[in-house]
Amino acid sequence: MKSHPKDYKAYYLLAYLYEYNDDHRRYGPGFDMPRAIELYQKSLALKEDSVWNHVNLGWLYRLAGRTDEAIGHFERAQMLDSRNALTAADLAFAYLDKAMLDRARDVYEVFLRGVEKLPDSLRFKTFDDLLLAYQPPPTKTP
């Protein structure tokens, strides 16, 4: 970091590492959420249009119970890459956290219509599939 203080990727990669705990589990007990958030914010300050910075920061905010902030980042990621299945699902899940079923359905169905051919790897082929998989955020950490 000292040798490349303006490299957004360096901050992104370090933030990603802080999402893991000592047992190498992402978002596992003891991971350093505040440090990961700080590093993603620094990365975004250097490159605001980085989709994965927005997605990962959105996840951390969602886990922290800061759903409005998570939605803002997921919406920005969706604007940057409207064909990204993970971004569409994350945004829909965040809307579901706020009991915004219609917005969740709209964002996911618009995404599905925008994809010419659904890849086999797409986990949620319909909004109903997404609803079945929905789980509220498991962790609330400052």
Image (spheres, helix red, strand yellow):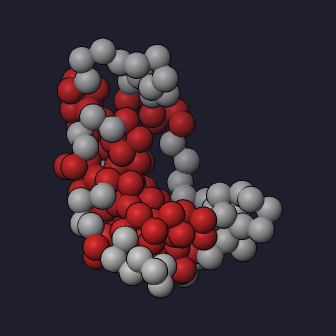
Marker count (numbered): 0
Residue located farthest toward the front when viewing the structure as drawn: 3
Residue at figure coordinates x 47%, y 84% from the top left: 2
Asked whether, in this view, residue 43 is left or right of residue 11, the answer is: left
Q: Nearer the viewer, residue 44 or 105?
A: 44
Determine whether 141 is above or below 50 in the image: below
Residue located farthest toward the right when viewing the structure as drawn: 23
Q: Position of residue 118 (x, y in %)?
A: 35, 18
Is any atom of residue 80 visible in this view? Answer: yes
Asked whether, in this view, residue 31 is left or right of residue 128, the answer is: right
Q: Quadrant of the C terminus?
A: bottom right
Determine whether 110 is above or below 40 in the image: above
Residue at figure coordinates x 36%, y 68% from the top left: 8
Residue at figure coordinates x 52%, y 33% from the top left: 132
Residue located farthest toward the bottom when viewing the structure as drawn: 2
Residue at figure coordinates x 45%, y 25% from the top left: 122
Q: Position of residue 134 (x, y in %)?
A: 51, 42
Q: Nearer the viewer, residue 15 or 1?
A: 1
Q: Position of residue 56 (x, y in %)?
A: 45, 59
Is any atom of residue 99 visible in this view? Answer: no
Q: Position of residue 18 (x, y in %)?
A: 60, 70
Determine whether 39 is above or below 72 in the image: below
